[in-house]
Amino acid sequence: MDNKEFKFEGRFISVKVEESRFGMYEIVIGHSPFGGEIIAIHKDDVLLVEQFRHPTGLSMWELPGGAVDTTEDPLLGAIREAEEEVNITFKPEDLTLVSVRYPVPSLMNVVTNTYLGHLPDDFDRTTVIHQASELDDARWFNIDELIENYKKDPASDINGVVGSLLQAKALGLI
């Protein structure tokens, strides 16, 4: 075995195995401490992506987004992530900051800025293509139905999404 070998390399963390005089040990290396995501609204629907999350061992529905590079503006990082994940392009002036979420130990280790953007009524949903290498699926959900279903099952995996939607509603953005 090489003196240093990566067991896992991801956007948020990497895990490296190193040898020392005491034996082998794992080192967790953190990457950017920031994330960005976009609430993409088309008419009465919101776009969610399904992605496997290692800390939970489950695929979870969430907003399109991801890690923001350390030298990148969080807004521009969120726009880049939406383009990469689902092929939707937003302009910075068309997005509104809705919330800032702080780390949740062992699940989300980044500060995440959530932005909201309305797509035009004539937006062609068939142009949304989920990035197969990162995502399991991408789908449009009716906002009110999503919130109502969450109220029936608050332990579901969409609590962060619903919290952001409720915040956007409270701000009069949707």
Image: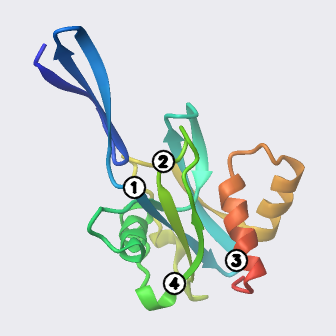
What is the distance, in whole Å, between disc 3 and disc 4 at their CAs?
Answer: 12 Å
* Label 1 element class: loop
In x, y percent, where is residue 113?
A: 51, 68
Label 1 vs 2, first from the N-terminus: 1
- Residue type, mark 3 in image: Ala
Check disc 4 and report its element: helix, strand or loop: loop
Q: Mark 4 sits on what residue?
A: 95
Q: Are marks 3 and 2 in contact (CB under 8 Å)?
A: no
**Which mark is drawn over residue 33?**
1
What residue sits right under mark 3 in the picture? 168
The image quarter containing residue 96 is bottom right
Q: Quadrant of the C terminus?
A: bottom right
Report the residue that reaches farthest toward the front: 21
Q: Which residue is mark 2?
A: 109
Q: CA distance from mark 1 to mark 4?
A: 22 Å
Q: CA distance from mark 1 to mark 2?
A: 7 Å
Q: Position of residue 18 (x, y in %)?
A: 20, 21
Mark 3 or 1 closer to N-term? 1
Q: Amino acid at mark 1?
A: Pro
Amino acid type indicated by mark 2 = Asn
